[in-house]
């Protein structure tokens, strides 16, 4: 079972010793908690990559994370709908 992790541990794991990225994200209202659930830790990984590797600003990161959450939710909805449709077709 995966448990929560401290923000600093996640950043260290990602090789980001500089806390300025976290400060920038927190100024944008992101990742304000000290402990992160696994899905939020994954978002922090994505956010750090967007900033560090692609030069996206924190406001842009917020937009990307919002769109990513929506895409993941839509992907889940499509998967459930497809499974339901296949079950109905198999029942005929």
Image (tube, helix red, strand yellow):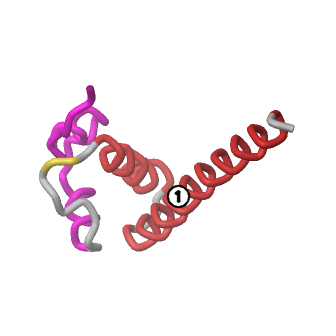
Q: Position of residue 9 (x, y in %)?
A: 17, 37
At 19% from the left and 39% from the top, the residue drawn is 4
* Quadrant of the drawing holding the N terminus: top left
Q: Is residue 63 above or below residue 31?
A: below
Q: Position of residue 25 (x, y in %)?
A: 28, 64
| Other residues around mark 1 within 10 Å, as few (<14) / some (14–19) / many (≥20) | some
Residue 48 vs residue 81, the one in the foreground: 81
Residue 77 vs residue 85, the one in the foreground: 85
At 18% from the left and 46% from the top, the residue drawn is 7
Q: Position of residue 24 (x, y in %)?
A: 26, 66
Left or right placement of residue 43 versus residue 29 in this view: right
Q: Is residue 45 above or below residue 47?
A: above
Q: Which residues are magenta?
A: 1-27
* Quadrant of the drawing holding the C terminus: top right
Label 1 sits on residue: 68
Quarter assignment of residue 16: top left
Left or right placement of residue 59 versus residue 24 in this view: right
Q: Position of residue 45 (x, y in %)?
A: 37, 45
Q: Secondary structure at mark 1?
A: helix
């Amino acid at each position: 079972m995966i448990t929560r992790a401290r923000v600093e541990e996640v950043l260290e794991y990602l090789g980001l010793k500089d806390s300025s990225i976290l400060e920038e994200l927190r100024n944008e209202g992101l990742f304000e908690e000290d402990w992160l659930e696994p899905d939020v830790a994954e978002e922090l990984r994505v956010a750090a990559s967007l900033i560090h590797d692609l030069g996206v600003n924190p406001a842009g990161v917020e937009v990307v994370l919002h769109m990513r959450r929506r895409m993941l939710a839509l992907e889940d909805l499509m998967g459930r709908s497809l499974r339901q449709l296949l079950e109905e077709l198999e029942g005929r």
